[in-house]
Image (cartoon, helix red, strand yellow):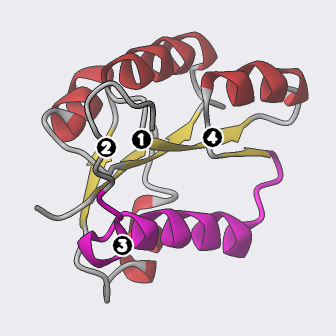
Amino acid sequence: MKPTVVVHERGRLWIGRVRNRLKELPVRVVHSTCQADCLEALRGQRESVLLIDLDWNLRRGIELLGTVLRFDPDVAVIVLAGPHSRALELPLRQLGIAAFFPMPWPLVKVLDVVERAARARLPENLTVVFKKRGQPL
């Protein structure tokens, strides 16, 4: 199964750029504009990446992050936040996000992080860990 990259945003600022950047990788790139679309794209998927723009609706974005991380704690979450949301970085990092970018967003750096996260989730880059019963990982 291909890794999934979900771009959750109000408009179409990032989806074209992400698709263009990942066109050589065997990943599925999905655009979502509402919580239901985002959750549907991630449902049953493992090794996913979520690029989420919190600038346009902070409350709903935080709710969505909580839901996504509850269902799949291994998803790589990359957060794009508004210019006055620096105080959110620490609590979001404690939730387990992979990257946090306040405005102004560095285009190349954001795309680099998305690509690295997607590449790390390709089947040939995953490691299978076997453990004996009763032993911690």
Q: Quadrant of residue 56?
A: top right
- Percent x, y of residue 43: 16, 32
Using residue 2 as the reference point, say whether residue 63 is left or right of it.
right
Magenta residues (range): 102-128
Circles 1 and 3: CB atoms closer than 8 Å:
no
| Element type at mark 4 | strand
Q: Which amino acid does label 4 sit on?
A: Val
Q: Which amino acid does label 1 sit on?
A: Val
How much space separates mark 4 and mark 1, taking CA atoms? 12 Å
| Element type at mark 2 | loop
For marks 2 and 4, the one nearer the N-term is: 4
Q: Name the residue under label 2.
A: 131
How much space separates mark 2 and mark 1, taking CA atoms? 22 Å
Q: Mark 4 points at which residue?
A: 79
| Element type at mark 1 | loop
| Element type at mark 3 | helix
Q: Name the residue under label 3.
A: 19
Question: Which residue lies at the image location 41% right of the left edge and 41% below the top edge?
Answer: 75
